[in-house]
Amino acid sequence: GQSLEQPSEVTAVEGAIVQINCTYQTSGFYGLSWYQQHDGGAPTFLSYNALDGLEETGRFSSFLSRSDSYGYLLLQELQMKDSASYFCALRTNAGKSTFGDGTTLTVKP
Amino acid sequence: GAVVSQHPSRVICKSGTSVKIECRSLDFQATTMFWYRQFPKQSLMLMATSNEGSKATYEQGVEKDKFLINHASLTLSTLTVTSAHPEDSSFYICSASSGGFEAFFGQGTRLTVV
């Protein structure tokens, strides 16, 4: 089976940088995805890492270390609208994902 | 990105009735669709995986006779919650994949069984 661990809550101030960590256990690995979900909404795709290293998409970056079974999502220049839940998800075959429990990010002025 | 439309966005039904939720990929062919359930403040739990033209594969603990999934075409999958009970009240979300690494989510359906 698969399991993921991420912090339940993170708080940061506007303009700051925040890192959300995710450690995982899996028997078969295809990639690690990150999703953002606002209250009452559906998840939206943020980033995906299949290989080690950093992927940058605007203010968001995601990092993966397969040897450490570890990844993180980095959010820069935080804005109030970034307050949401962030999920890491293990991709195990075409599109199928196992989600972590989510990290609630609160951005304060 | 690709668009997945889920309908209805909200539904209230009486206990014992059935509810059908549709998930459509609007601008791509979805070879695989996934159905998730999410309780408040919790993670998304995969219920089943459906491939066009074949029977859905259900995750352990999900009742296939209660949650009927039909993936009749490359753009449409439906989830029918049969004989709904209050404990089935939840947020149901579909996602669709054309085989790449990214799966696109629908808007979700909030089901309330009264």
Image: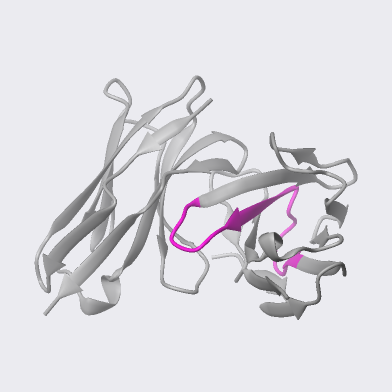
Question: Is B12 situated left or right of B64 in this image?
Answer: left
Of B107 and B96, which appears nearest the observer? B107
Question: Is A40 situated left or right of B69 in this image?
Answer: left
Q: How is the image coloured?
A: one colour
Of A95 and B10, which appears nearest the observer? B10
Locate residue B98, reporting x and y percent.
67, 49
As for residue A74 lying within the magenta part, the answer is no
**Residue at image point 58% right, 59% down:** B104
Please count the marks in the image: 0
**Residue at image point 70% right, 37% down:** B61
Of B2 and B11, which appears nearest the observer? B11
As for residue B26 lying within the magenta part, the answer is yes
Say whether residue A54 is visible: no
State whether residue B15 is above or below residue B103.
below
Q: Quadrant of the C terminus of chain A?
A: bottom left
Q: Which residues are magenta?
A: B23-43
Residue A97 quadrant? top right
State whether residue A75 is above or below residue A33.
below
Locate residue B41, reporting x and y percent.
43, 61
**Residue at image point 17% right, 69% down:** A78
Say whether residue B30 is visible: yes
Residue B86 quadrant? bottom right
Of B114 and B46, which appears nearest the observer? B114
Question: Is A20 situated left or right of B85 in this image?
Answer: left
Locate residue A2, reporting x and y percent.
49, 29
Locate residue B44, reporting x and y percent.
53, 52
